[in-house]
Amino acid sequence: MSRTVIFTFVLFIAIACQSERGQVTEQNLTKKISLFNGKDLKGWRVDVPAIDENDTVRNPFIVRKNMLVSLGTPSGHLVTDQNYKNYRLELDYRFAGEPGNCGVLIHASTPRALYDMFPQSIEVQMMHQNAGDFWCIVEDITVDKMEKRRGPPHEWGITEGKKRRILNLTDNSEKALGEWNHMVIETVDDKIKVWLNGDLVNNGYNATAQEGQIALQAEGAEVEFKNIFLTPIQDVKP
């Protein structure tokens, strides 16, 4: 074998390894875990401030026809019992009636850390026509073209009154109302990527949290969920 052929082969391997560095492949994924059994809310806990004040207030999170349903009101969160780190979260959702607001919160920790309601976390928005936005909730994250997508730096922040919203990459990825949307959230160390119906809609890094609970919101609109799966990710090189 000539030196030229050997050099070309070595260069090809080096480029291939470099292109895969930091990327999640099928080899990094382990067995998929179902976070919702289709029967009850086992593995989750309800955090709704209004229930603390009046125990006759309805629980806004129910199971209906094998779907997990957020009724929208009263406002609150459904939070996993367990913490998770480095994973791919997949779920299907749709607005059951009128479009509105909802979200998935990842790396959640301190309950009611913002407005005495939202747990400390990074929210992946599901609000109609805004799905894929990041909202910083006493945690932070960085994206490319930060000023364009978040506003003037002096207004950024992670608490009440600050610019906590980071716009997504496309608002054209949602299905028509009544159809199911498929969302994928992938977290590896301090990086978070979000896909909606196959489109990359956000890509963040330097997240200030790298693990925590997962939460679903009740935030005004009725939303149906199904096929909620988590796949741990292992051994991803930086």
Image (cartoon, rainbow, N blue to C red):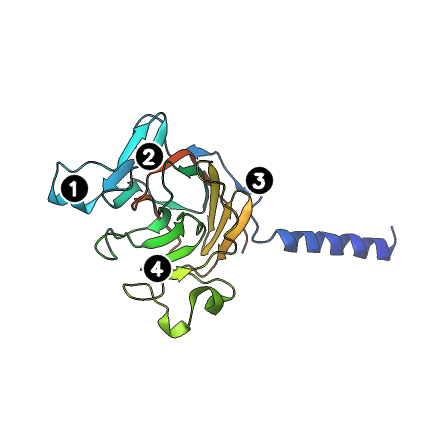
| Discs 3/1, front | 1
Amino acid type at mark 4: Glu
The residue to which callout 3 is attached is 26
Could you tell which of marks 4 and 2 lies nearer the N-terminus? 2
Q: Can you tell which mark lies on residue 139?
A: 4
Q: Can you say whether 147 is above or below 214 in the image?
A: below
- Cα distance between the residues tagged 1 and 4: 26 Å
Q: Nearer the viewer, residue 146 or 176?
A: 176
Q: Can you say whether 48 is above or below 134 in the image?
A: above
Q: Is residue 20 left or right of residue 61?
A: right
**Could you say where residue 228 lies in the image, as x and y percent from the top left?**
41, 35
Amino acid type at mark 1: Ile
Could you tell which of marks 3 and 1 lies nearer the N-terminus? 3
**Could you say where residue 120 lies in the image, as x and y percent from the top left?**
30, 55
The residue to which callout 1 is attached is 51
Q: Pointer 4 and pointer 2: residues touching (CB < 8 Å)?
A: no
Secondary structure state at the residue bearing disc 1 = helix
**Could you say where residue 71 lies in the image, as x and y percent from the top left?**
29, 38
Q: Can you say whether 126 is above or below 151 in the image?
A: above
The residue to which callout 2 is attached is 69
Secondary structure state at the residue bearing disc 4 = loop
Q: Is residue 103 left or right of residue 195?
A: left
Q: Badge 3, how many Cα within 10 Å: few under 14, some, many 20+?
A: few
